[in-house]
Image (cartoon, rainbow, N blue to C red):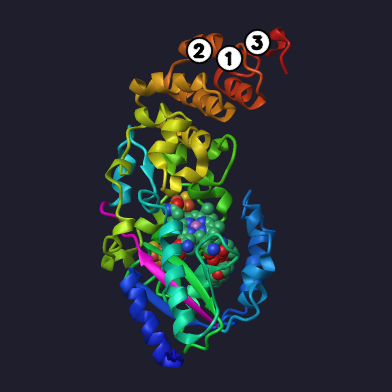
């Protein structure tokens, strides 16, 4: 039987209908060459070192900044958005200091998995109906999803740099399909931030050097997820009880007035990740961590980095009832967890108690990062490192 091949508007309508059925909330199309300023913008960001330890952002930068360099055959870029609007206001949890705050996107099944599967299905459908080639991407490929989505008219990059849709707000995850099909492009979306600067003003770590620009090295999302080793001292207190990601700048955006909770069932939030007690999280071993966070974005950090964040939240809790959990961290196998546990003990226990803890846990310590924290808590030289002959 002869197969019907669709083109142009007909093909696009079919794909739009299919995308809707698959659970996507928005679909727009742009051309691969729609944002000629991308190479300059990306290289300025990289040259400033704003990517921190995310070295992969600099690798294949030419492909990231130009879809045609990534795949010369691409003629149209389909940008898709899936809504993950949170059930509760993420800012409300920041006052619950005995509990950890996990960013809304991570309180559910890993969107990479959910969206990738749906993109593959949609890409396969497009490929069959249009007899065209496709490549699908979500997050991890060298693709600049936000500016492409803006060029496609899905929304605009707000002053917080995240893409905002006029109808859906900024709780939107993005995916892309590059295709050899010639599809009618949409008009880019204009900037609707106006004189507002709520997102810039609320940022606890002052991570925006200017509106529309983010220095990832100062962002709590980067620090809690991507950064390895101890958290630099200046960011520990501002982290509060945020233990994975940060939603502050997204949560204050007035354009969320139209936002709805996630429509896609597979992106429904898990109740046990909404406000987990810090005391429970501090006790997670590798196995417990994997069991609790399997299938969610949280698994990305691994157990040690996650418990490191929990130690900082405990240090910020001002609750002496959590001091035993910080003390548990002093005996942890991970030096980074031990280092942040020292900081937490210093915040929750008085100098005499800390000296006592040092005698019990610190005298055999050999890791420089942990000894530096003991020095900071007890005062340099008071750890008796010179007497014991350790470095
Ligand atoms: C690296 C990365 C991060 C880094 C850096 C974030 C950043 N803003 O670059 C860190 C770890 C900090 C991060 C955090 C988050 N991320 Co992230 N991240 C990415 C990733 C992989 C690449 C982003 C990128 O290209 N950055 C490089 C810089 C150069 O890009 P940029 O921000 O667009 O920079 C623009 C501006 O500087 C602008 N510009 C420069 N000068 C000027 C001057 C003027 C006047 C103007 C107007 C503009 C302008 O031009 C640049 C290019 O457009 C994308 C996935 C992807 N492949 O695209 C997800 C992605 C951006 N992240 C996402 C999410 C959800 C988050 C978090 C909300 C998670 C959380 N809750 O913790 C936070 C948000 C923090 C924030 N305010 O940005 C979503 C955002 C969805 C959306 N609606 O936009 C994405 C798209 C993943 C996805 N597939 O859904 N992320
Ligand atoms: S995610 Fe948090 S730390 Fe990062 S820029 Fe937004 S408000 Fe600042
Ligand atoms: S909070 Fe205000 S300035 Fe920030 S992205 Fe939203 S509208 Fe723009």
Q: Which structural element holds mark 2? A: helix
Quadrant of the image for the C terminus? top right
Contact, mark 2 vs mark 1 (Cβ under 8 Å): yes
Q: Which segment is the magenta one?
A: 76-88
72 vs 320, nearest the viewer = 72
Percent position (x, y) of residue 43? 67, 66
Residue at the disc numbered 1: 362
Is 187 left, or right, of 275 in this rendering? right
Against 353, is 128 above or below? below
Which mark is nearer the camera, 3 or 2?
Answer: 2
79 vs 336, nearest the viewer = 79
Which mark is nearer the camera, 3 or 1?
Answer: 1
32 vs 296, nearest the viewer = 296
Q: Where is residue 195, by image quadrant?
A: bottom left
Residue at the disc numbered 3: 384
Q: Residues within 10 Å of mark 3 (few under 14, many from 20)?
A: few
């Amino acid at each position: 039987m002869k197969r019907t091949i669709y083109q142009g508007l007909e093909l696009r309508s079919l794909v739009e209908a299919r995308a809707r059925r698959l659970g996507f909330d928005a679909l727009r199309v742009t051309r691969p060459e729609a944002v000629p300023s991308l190479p300059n913008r990306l290289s300025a960001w990289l040259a400033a070192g704003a990517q921190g330890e995310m070295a992969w952002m600099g690798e294949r930068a030419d492909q990231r900044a130009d879809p045609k360099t990534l795949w010369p055959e691409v003629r149209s870029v389909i940008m898709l958005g899936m809504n993950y609007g949170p059930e509760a206001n993420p800012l409300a949890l920041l006052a619950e200091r005995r509990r950890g705050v996990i960013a809304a996107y991570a309180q559910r099944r890993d969107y990479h998995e959910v969206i990738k599967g749906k993109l593959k299905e949609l890409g396969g459908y497009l490929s069959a109906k249009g007899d065209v080639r496709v490549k699908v991407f979500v997050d991890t490929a060298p693709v600049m999803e936000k500016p492409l989505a803006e060029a496609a008219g899905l929304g605009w990059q707000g002053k917080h740099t995240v893409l905002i849709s006029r109808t859906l707000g900024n709780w939107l995850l993005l995916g892309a399909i590059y295709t050899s099909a010639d599809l009618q492009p949409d008009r880019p979306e204009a900037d609707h931030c106006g004189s507002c600067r709520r997102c810039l003003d609320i940022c606890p770590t002052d991570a925006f050097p200017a509106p529309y620009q983010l220095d990832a090295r100062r962002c709590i999302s980067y620090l809690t997820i991507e950064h390895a080793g101890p958290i630099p001292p200046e960011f520990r207190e501002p982290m509060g009880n945020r233990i994975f990601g940060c939603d502050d700048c997204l949560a204050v955006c007035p354009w969320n007035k139209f936002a709805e909770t996630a429509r896609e069932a597979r992106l429904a939030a898990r109740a046990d990740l909404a406000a987990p007690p810090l005391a429970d999280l501090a006790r997670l071993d590798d196995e417990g961590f994997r069991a609790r966070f399997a299938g969610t974005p949280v698994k990305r950090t691994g157990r040690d980095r996650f418990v490191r964040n929990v130690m900082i939240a405990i240090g910020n809790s001002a609750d002496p009832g959590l001091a035993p959990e910080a003390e548990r961290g002093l005996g942890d196998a991970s030096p980074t967890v031990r280092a942040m546990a020292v900081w937490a003990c210093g915040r929750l226990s008085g100098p005499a108690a800390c000296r006592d803890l040092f005698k019990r846990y610190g005298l055999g310590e050999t890791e420089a990062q942990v000894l530096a924290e003991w020095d900071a808590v007890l005062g340099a030289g008071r750890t008796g490192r010179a007497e014991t002959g350790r470095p």
